[in-house]
Image (spheres, rainbow, N blue to C red):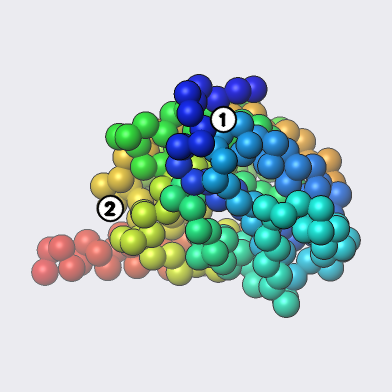
């Protein structure tokens, strides 16, 4: 899979980062695929993995990868701080003008970064993937669709897929957009704040694969309940309170 770049030496710099929590069985393939893909796109790239307090073999795997690949930088959280906290660390640590992230569980293919890269024109600020088909158990598909339609209505979002964690964006966005969430609702926060700030969003179809290792950290009652509370609190801050200010 090759990108349509005439002179990659003068292409923009690219940070690729992965939030990882207990992804010891998949993170090596993700990092290696990311490095191979980044080399196609630009000479100026870095790979970052934010290890969010993993308790499996993730730390050992990353230590070996860091020894072999000089472009890889591992950032370790001493304890599990949450998905949003891992993303915030990744964005804050990125040094290149373009930033891509996806999860470390291999449900997305880093090689498809090429497709996002080719759609990041001068007029686009963020390229957001949307799942061609969701490869999850039926209950997750149903919950995911309900969540998607609910938050689209609540937050007035105009994108196809709120929770597709396969995104390429300009780092300059964070000069105006500040992220605060430590949980998974950070994805909702990103898209709402980017949209409200007037940035241009392009959407590109990407493949979604069955989880080959580990299990979802989200789909249990406690986390679903916590997500509902987080979504409502975020709606209060970004929609209700903002609306009150605009009409006062």
Pointer 1: residues within 10 angstroms few (<14), some, or many (20+)?
A: some
Q: Position of residue 36 (x, y in %)?
A: 70, 36
What residue lies at 32% left-to-right and 40% top-to-bottom? 200
Secondary structure, mark 1, is helix
Mark 1 or mark 2, which is nearer to you?
Answer: 1
Q: Is residue 95 left or right of residue 72?
A: left
Q: Is residue 95 left or right of residue 18?
A: left
Q: Position of residue 120 (x, y in %)?
A: 42, 34
What residue lies at 27% left-to-right and 68% top-to-bottom? 241
Residue 220 appears anywhere in the view: no
Q: Which mark is residue 197?
A: 2
- Cα separation between marks 1 and 2: 26 Å
Quadrant including the C terminus: bottom left
The residue nearer to you, when weighing 83 against 169, is: 169
The residue nearer to you, when weighing 224 against 45, is: 45
What residue lies at 84% left-to-right and 68% top-to-bottom? 55
Vertical placement of 118 versus 139: above or below?
above
Vertical placement of 228 versus 113: above or below?
below
Q: What residue would you read off at disc 1?
A: 114
Q: Position of residue 126 (x, y in %)?
A: 41, 42
Q: Is residue 14 left or right of residue 217?
A: left
Pointer 2: residues within 10 angstroms few (<14), some, or many (20+)?
A: few
Mark earlier in primary sequence (1, 2): 1
Q: Position of residue 69 (x, y in %)?
A: 76, 51
Secondary structure, mark 2, is loop
């Amino acid at each position: 899979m090759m990108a349509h770049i005439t002179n990659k030496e003068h292409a923009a710099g690219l940070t690729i980062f992965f939030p990882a929590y207990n992804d010891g069985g998949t993170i090596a393939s993700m990092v290696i695929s990311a490095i191979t893909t980044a080399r196609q796109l630009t000479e100026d790239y870095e790979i970052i993995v934010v290890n969010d307090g993993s308790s499996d073999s993730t730390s050992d795997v990353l230590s070996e990868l860091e020894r072999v690949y000089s472009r890889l930088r591992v950032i370790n959280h001493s304890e599990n701080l949450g998905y949003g906290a891992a993303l915030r660390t990744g964005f804050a640590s990125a040094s290149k003008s373009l930033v891509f992230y996806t999860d470390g569980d291999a449900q997305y293919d880093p090689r498809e970064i090429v497709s996002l890269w080719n759609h990041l024109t001068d007029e686009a600020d963020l390229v957001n993937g949307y799942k061609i088909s969701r490869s999850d158990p039926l209950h997750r598909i149903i919950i995911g669709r309900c969540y998607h339609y609910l938050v689209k209505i609540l937050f007035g979002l105009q994108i196809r897929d709120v929770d597709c964690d396969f995104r390429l964006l300009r780092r300059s966005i964070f000069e105006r957009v500040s992220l605060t969430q430590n949980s998974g609702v950070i994805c909702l926060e990103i898209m709402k704040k980017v949209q409200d700030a007037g940035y241009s969003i392009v959407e590109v179809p990407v493949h979604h694969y069955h989880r080959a290792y580990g299990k979802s950290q989200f789909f249990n009652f406690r986390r679903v309940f916590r997500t509902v509370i987080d979504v409502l609190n975020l709606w209060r801050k970004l929609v209700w309170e903002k609306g009150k200010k605009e009409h006062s």
